[in-house]
Image (tube, rainbow, N blue to C red):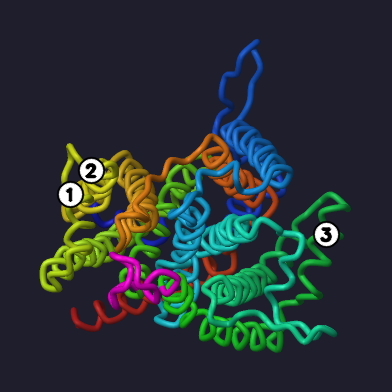
Amino acid sequence: MAQKDQLDERLLTGEHTELSIDESIGGVVLDQQRHMYPPMKAPFGLKTSPWMVTALMGFTFVNIMLLAITVLLFNGIGVWGNNQPVGWGFDIINFVWWIGIGHAGTLISAILLLLRQQWRNSINRFAEAMTIFAVMCAGLFPLLHTGRPWVAYWLFPYPNVMALWPQFRSPLIWDVFAVSTYFTVSFLFWYVGLIPDFATLRDRAKKRAAQITFGILSMGWRGSAKHWHRYMHASIILAGISTPLVLSVHSIVSFDFAMSIVPGWNVTIFPPYFVAGAVYAGFAMVILFAIPLRKWYKLEDFITMKHFDWMAKVMLATGLIVAYGYAMEWFYAWYSGAPVELSLIYNKMHLFDAPYSWAYWLLIVCNVAIPQGLWIPKLRRNFKYLFFVSLVISLGMWLERFVIIPMSLTRDYLPSSFGYYSPTIWDFCLFFGTIGFFVFLMMLFVRFLPMINIFEIKELKHHLEHDKAHAAHHGEEAKV
């Protein structure tokens, strides 16, 4: 039992050499069939793999998304449930939700790199990929929300003969600059981290097409001291740029609401509250992907129980901040004594005579009550519970955005502007379509790129062996 507990505390298990690390991680890309979990049984006696099933499901929903976009472009955003006074509906709810999911990747890759946290090495690569794909999904919604996505370039301050400039006081412009900057820096950080691994795959590939492709992507990497020196400088610079983005991007998104005078929105706690919620949802999504991927591709030696324990602790900490934000909403309404704020809290909390109270109490259960089991170490190391909690948190964070946006807009200062919001089938099609798009992109990433950072795992192995030898040496000296 003591030996098992000791294994649980390790960041790298098994007896691995640099060659076996290349084979275990790089082989997933170069020879996936040999590294895949045993095939699943399919109808009509066919055999398939979990990757194929997941990719096909994602691709199916991608087509649903394309259908929803086609209907939207032909008929206008009237096919959505947006109305007066609810001008922001599923489009902005899903935009904020997707931006939040991308935050864990930036935190893992940038902040934990600057803090020299070794437990990031096994999960940073696919967390960074999640960031990029989540931002791509998020960008669709404000783009389509304008109703004329073909003139989206008007949102950028480009020179033109009419001397027209964007309205920089508009939240839409803030989002354009925040999201485009976030995507650009995240993509550069992700790609720079991939260059040494592209060179490894180039050298190990046996097919000519793979050699050429990875050779081009590796940009002439030879692993020389000069290359490593420049690589480390680029990584630190990009990490330094990315770190404030973790705080600033979702703070700017929260300003879309906090800068207005709508009841329930004009509060100063929104920026830290939104950032904590984004990291909360982001880590939940990382766990949702990490648990099946490590099983499918036999990566238990690289993504160990220690990684899940730390991710669960981060979720628990950010979840408590989110719970504090919910308590502050009640306090603001009570302390201000404003009738509209008190009315909004009434609409959230009264189950039987308020239209959206079910969503509010469900988000409290999902985001506050159920995750409290993460205090227990045994549950933090239970994959079934972790997967369930991560799924529940993802649902709860979406419900939080639903409660914040339509619920506040349906009860304004004037009774004449009271309304009700009900999404349409096309709202749901576009939302679930983006989920399929995200899953499909993740499956393509897993298939064609190394999902774990190969050279960082080798570096981690070297550090762990050095620390072990150092401890053994000092132990021998103590005995003497």
The residue beneath circle 1 is: 349
Q: Which residue is found at the position 12% from the left and 70% from the top? A: 337
Q: Which residue is found at the position 72% from the left and 64% from the top? A: 198
Q: Which of the pair 243/428 is nearer the observer?
A: 428
Residue 285: assigned label:
none
Q: Which residue is found at the position 52% from the left and 79% from the top? A: 242
Residue farthest toward the top in the current orientation of the protein: 44
Q: Is residue 471 above or below residue 144?
A: below
Q: Please give the range of residues in magenta.
A: 255-270
Residue 411 position within the rendered picture, expressed as x and y whole percent measured from the top left? 31, 55
Residue farthest toward the front in the current orientation of the protein: 416
| Principal secondary structure, stretch drawn in magenta | loop
For the question of whether residue 2 can be seen, the reply is no
Q: Amino acid at mark 2?
A: Ala
Residue 31 position within the rendered picture, expressed as x and y whole percent measured from the top left? 70, 44
Tell me, yes or no, whether the two marked residues, 3 and 1, touch with CB atoms within 8 Å.
no
> Judging from the image, what secondary structure is the residue with disc 3 in?
helix
Mark found first going from the N terminus, 2 or 3? 3
Tell me, yes or no, whether the two marked residues, 1 and 2, touch with CB atoms within 8 Å.
yes
Q: Amino acid at mark 1?
A: Met
Residue 213: assigned label:
3
Assign the C terminus to one quadrant of the image: bottom left
Report how many numbered discs are placed on residues in the image: 3
Residue 147 position within the rendered picture, expressed as x and y whole percent measured from the top left? 66, 56
Q: Quadrant of residue 85?
A: bottom left
Mark found first going from the N terminus, 3 or 1? 3
> Judging from the image, what secondary structure is the residue with disc 2 in?
loop
The residue beneath circle 2 is: 354
